[in-house]
Image (tube, helix red, strand yellow):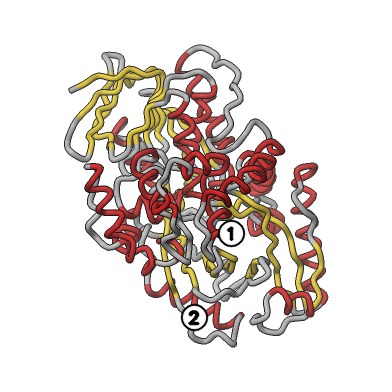
Amino acid sequence: MADQQVDLLVIGAGASGASVAYEATRRGLSVALLEAGDVGGGTSCRSTKLLHGGVRYLELAFKTLDLAQLRLVREALLERSHWLAQAPFLARRLELALPTQHLCEQAYYRLGLGMYDALAGQRSIGHSRLLSQQQMLQALPLLKECQGGVAYSDGQFDDARLNLLLGLTAEQRGATLRTRCRVVQLETDATGQLKAAISESANGQRERWCASAFVNATGIRTDEIRQMAEADAPPRMLTSRGSHIVLEQTLCPEGLGLLVPSTADGRVLFMLPFHGRTLVGTTDEACTKESATSPSPEEESYLLDYVRDWFPQLQNPKVTSRWAGGRPLLKPADQGMDSSRVVREHEVETLSCGLVSVMGGKWTTCRPMAEDTLAAVERQLGRPLPKPEPMPLRGAAESLQATLDGLQRQSHQLEALLPDTPLRTAQVAHLQSTYGLDAVALIEPAEASQREPLSTVIPLCAAELDHAIQREHARSSSDVLARRCRLAMVDLDDAERLRPQVDALLDQAGVAAGSTSPISHQLNP
């Protein structure tokens, strides 16, 4: 069994783990990032794709006088603007509308969203505004009759791609990134302090990772690693399943999303533009870890009932993809497992053996989660960490303006490189929104036949499939078609059509890992 030595071992390469590895690398630490499955393959690729403060958390904060909720909203709003600036090719501003039926309701939402704007301060990305009945009808032509609405701004992003780029950027700066590499044992020294972790790869190969600090960033699996370190560690995590469906119909043709602010059971639903289709989600139901990634028929029916209610002309919506993800909710230490005081804030815990666990939180706030985690790592190391060095994400430049200018120049290069097809404009947009400033470097060396678009849903090409396997740690058809690009998350049938081509490339590369099962089974095991 080979021994590896690093300053910091991070277990779990979801949003929080990849962020910790990225921020640690910026501070000069040697880092190993171990992931039992694919980078971002769990909850982190199954979000509602929103970078947001959380309008419902703001309302809850004022209704319950809960300052924890208010702090969460403020922190998330600041981080929303951070990601829009750091990864403008992956994230964009999105307006959402709350429909209203009378003036009192409109005034209530206008006041609340005005507070939402104010909490963002100078990092506001757009002010809320009133919408007339005619404006609502123009933006959402199939929407049932309402008196108007209130629009506000949040961010929409590619969650799986941002997760991957955080990990790949850390790797580019020297971190070790291993996927299909499960931690199976933790070793302690004579004083009871962690000294090593034993990992096992998909082919059964074991390695020992000796480190000065260990971070557990495994989301809904956090308690498993905590109890591997200390058998009597009390459980801290709750799992809530959020389910989503994608409709073939375009319900948001003008790019304005819809927020259904209240349902019969008090949940909030989004209906959002998504790759020319409509993303509907999310439900919020307690579940086991094992059932977290599979939406139930009841949840799908629930979502479709609300689609038919709000868009009565659409009685037979066609679902082209579906997925679910388990939110890692943090149980307050002094509450029972059925606590209703669960919020989307995070906590960094250090067990007596030295294991640092980052728990709870949400996608938008993964950076402050990582910074708080590294503060605990600093205490474990017994020395201050250096100040972080600038480290743009792969595909981005040193500043927002430099990235935007580079994307504009690159678009002309891509037009010259890509085949003259009806999808060329869409293909340029797809390549830039996926790879940022790295798009030309991917396409330029490829043969002409590898640049041809393979799908009218998302115009990916064969060069991208090969790149995902050779350069981006993809090891299954789901890795390639659901996370390196989003085709399976938009249209399962079209992804299934391309699966044999992807499986052949995986076999050719000698890295196939269970890729013979249908995409739908891989996406919703």
Assess disc 2: are there few (<14), some (14-19) or many (≥20) residues with their C-alpha within 10 Å of its C-alpha: some
> Quadrant of residue 470 in the image?
top left
Residues 134 and 382: in front is: 134
Does residue 367 lie above or below 355 as drawn?
Answer: below
Image position of 52 with respect to 244: above or below: above
- Residue hosting label 2: 317
Q: Where in the figure is residue 279, as x and y percent of width and height?
A: 53, 66
Q: Is residue 120 above or below residue 49?
A: above
Image quadrant for the N terminus? top left
Image point (79%, 79%), residue name? 134
Give the alpha-carbon distance from disc 1 to disc 2, as whole Å: 28 Å
Q: In which quadrant of the rendered view does residue 145 lie?
A: bottom right
The mark that comes first in sequence, 1 or 2, is 2
Task: Name the amino acid, label 1.
Answer: Thr
In the image, is residue 150 above or below residue 118? below
Residue bearing mark 1? 425
Along the horizontal axis of the image, is 286 left or right of 395? left
Residue occupying image coordinates x 67% and y 76%: 140
Q: Between residue 407 and residue 486, name the one nearer to us.
A: 407
Identify residue type, mark 2: Pro
**Could you say where residue 20 lies in the image, as x and y percent from the top left?**
49, 31
User: Image check: 210 left or right of 146?
Assistant: left
* Percent x, y of residue 469: 34, 44
Note whether residue 282 is visible.
yes
Label 1 sits on a secondary structure element that is: helix
